[in-house]
Amino acid sequence: MNATSRPNPDDILRVVQNDQRAARRGQLKIFFGASAGVGKTYAMLEAAHAARRGGLDVVVGIVETHGRPETERILLDLPCLPRRMVNYRDVAITEFDLETALARKPAILVLDEMAHTNAPGSRHPKRWQDIVELLDAGIDVYTTLNVQHLESLNDVVVNITGVDVQETVPDEIFDEADDIKLVDIPTDELLERLKQGKVYIAEGAADRAAQNFFSKTNLMSLRELALRRTAEYVDADTDDQRIRAGLFTPNIAGDRILVCVGGDALAAKLVRTGRRIATSLKAPWTVLTIENDSAPTGDRQRNRKSRALRIGEQNGAQIVTLQEDRIGEAILAYARSKGITKILIGKIIRSPWIDWFKGSLAEYVIRHSGDIDVYVITGTSDYATKEVTNSSRPSEPLAHYIWSLVITAGFTLLGVALDSILEPIDQVMLYLIGVVIAATRLGRLPALLTALMSVLSLNFFFVVPLYTFDVANASYWLTFSVMLITSWVISSQAGRLRIQTLNARRREKETQALYALSKELSATRGQEKVIQTAIKHIQASLNGEVDVWLPSADGVLKPQLVLQDGEIRSAEQAHDLKQEMIAKWCFEHIQPAGLGTNTMPSAVVFFYPIRGTGRTFGALSFRPAQPNEGLSSEERATIEACAYLLATVLDRVDAATEAEESRLSREAAQLKNTFLSSMSHDLRTPLSTIRGAAEALVQQERLPEKSRQVLYASIYKESDRLTRIVNNLLDLTRYEAGNMILKSEPYYLPELIGAAIKNCEALLKNITIDTAFADEDSLLLKIDGLLIEQLTQNLIENAAAHSPAQAQISIRSYKTEEGLILDLLDQGPGIPPGFELKIFDKFFTMQQHDRPKGAGLGLAICQAIIQLHGGRIWVDNSPLGGACFHVLFPSHLIVHDMPADMEK
């Protein structure tokens, strides 16, 4: 396979992704025409009837008959969904009911007029967005569309017909349709239908249409556009089929298109033109915009730019935003770094003097483009008028202009006070200081006003003849001119520096906020604390209310935490049902929703999905302090960045949780194996002894009495040992399950220890016990006597098991600030370093002196018993050798006043 026939990997990936998406969503069939009246709706209803005859569930969502009898007749036999009533400005409007359609979920839904604006309050502002959601829900859709409603052809249609079509549909929707059916009739036949009243029923409507939009020239041009656009669709579909077969790759020439847009009136036209060129060349395309601190933009310019970028995004362009001061150099540098072959740039037609004075960006790019082709899209005089009228720099408040006059007056008074020692040229320097102050503090226009007033004040107060605007020495005109030019340069540069400083501070604040959020989140553990941290930082960065919406146990998204008056609290209070619906849509579709988006834009809250690597955690909502002003691009960028950080940390929390669960699972499995191994040994040994002794008693009937007594004793001893093991296991299970209820009563600790020693007499034949109890007034404890006796007995048995013959076990008590401490010291080998905590684990044993290995439950039970009493147990090695166990009985367990019955 040679290089020209090898499929492009990017194209293969695109086709595979499209196929995967098509397998999950419904099929879209568009009945496409050049204009109204060609029969699109009739053809769509005929196809719906055919599908219904084939056994499919076909339902009409909405069809506009426009009073045409043939359309009304063919619609009669098809089931229709009830329409939704919307009251807008006291006018009842019927609309397509998206919720009912999703709940009904037919196989095919007939939805007329894709290019339609929904009534205010609808989930989506445009019907094509309803169609996208229906497709995502797995519903096939039949719809109609005219060529003039395609976004990329909007400017072409304006040039052809003179009508600016406001209702447009992104070309991406058209290109991703599964089937395009061109409905076409000859132009003369359409005009005849128009005369017969089959297109517009209202009286006089046909004549007005024929004189305006429906002229023969317009219809022929629109028909040509429709045929070409359909051919492009078929061509692209053919290319995709060849890519699936690995036979052909489009864009062999390797063209890459770069569309450069700013805030002028040509922005949208540039993007549409770029889309058409990219489609015809089958080339990837990028829309580039450059933020320039030196050239501040007004709201209208920002809106134009945002709309152009949105058009590009909807039509499959890559959107790139750069922050540069030298726009021309930045465009060319980016183009060369990305291998761009063609640049589209706009040029407003204006006075040559303005071009000479300000320079032309298009001419700069052409002059330095080298081997990159440059396409210049020019604006007509209408565009130039719009540019002059609509462009607006941020206006300065009136107070700044007043302060500029105050600054001029202040330096004038200073000059008058120093008039005896200053020459007029020195006064010029004073006024320039005022210009610098005004430019850095007040803005460019107030600084220019300061410069003008400074020249007039200099002439009036300090140039002979005084107190007039006459100039005796003509050289002063040069001084005034230089002063004005210098002031203008200073004010321009200082104003530019001021704007750059403000923007730098804003970006620094955003960066610091994101860094602080990232740093604190990285050190936070647990989902709830992570969310609290995120809300606190986002709230500090934005002017508004922030909520985090997470799915509850029943799957309903609810706000988890809110920040009000600086305090974070749970958000269990009732919340807006509409917000819950928007949050659910955002969560399920993993797309922004609410304020400033294409989904429920009338809402006052913006929702952004918190999407992690493996799943979507929930949604982040933001309600600006001034919802009527909308959501700024800076606020949206901050929310997106914070949502990404939050999702990343929640991914980490999930991973840590899974790791902990995996660890616990491994430990549980290991514990199970240890338990089975230990129990199989500990239970088998006494059972084997009992079984052997019993067999000997049964089979040997004439055993001597002495041998019988030995066997009886062995059976009793081993059964007692077996009973202790089982009881210990049951006790430990109850302790860990939390089912134990303490029966606390006053007990004298030495008596409990004495009872425990007596129970262990069999183990202490060759071992002595030494006891010493200090602080008699602290030995009366309010405890569960049976449990503490068991604790002491387990410690004595453990010490005896690890002590050599003729050893001594010491039991001591003493009082500290924390409470009463009981120490038990043995003369065994001690505790190896690193095992001080592990010996309290279940089933952990240390074999010593060739003695039988225990079950490893005694010390675990001791720890559980003392923890139930609020105390603790620990172990270390005695300086004299052996282990020393310490048991702490907290101070609140000490009984200071002995009950009367105990005194008696």
Image: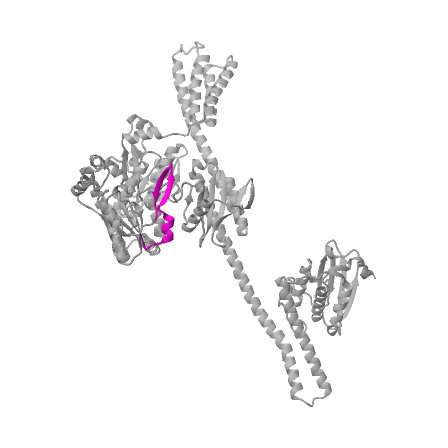
Identify the residue shown where x is 37% and y is 34%.
301
Looking at the image, the residue that sits furthest to the left is: 188
Left or right: 888 in relation to 107: right
Looking at the image, the residue that sits furthest to the bottom is: 702
Residue range in magenta is: 82-108
Identify the residue shown where x is 72% and y is 83%.
709
x, y (%) of residue 31? 25, 48
Q: Is residue 896 above or below residue 64?
A: below
Looking at the image, the residue that sits furthest to the right is: 904
Seen from the viewer's position, the closer of residues 586 and 530 is 586
Magenta residue check for 629: no
Identify the residue shown where x is 58% and y is 72%.
677
Left or right: 576 in relation to 17: right
Left or right: 9 in relation to 780: left
> How many numbered tags mark residues here?
0
Left or right: 885 in relation to 599: right
x, y (%) of residue 28? 30, 51
Image quadrant of residue 865? bottom right
Image quadrant of residue 256? top left
Q: Is residue 371 visible?
A: no
x, y (%) of residue 290? 37, 38
Magenta residue check for 95: yes
x, y (%) of residue 135? 34, 51
Quadrant showing the N terminus: bottom left
Seen from the viewer's position, the closer of residues 625 and 778 is 625
- Which color scheme is applied? one colour
Image quadrant of residue 788? bottom right
Quadrant showing the C terminus: bottom right
Q: Is residue 518 visible?
A: yes
Seen from the viewer's position, the closer of residues 322 and 122 is 122
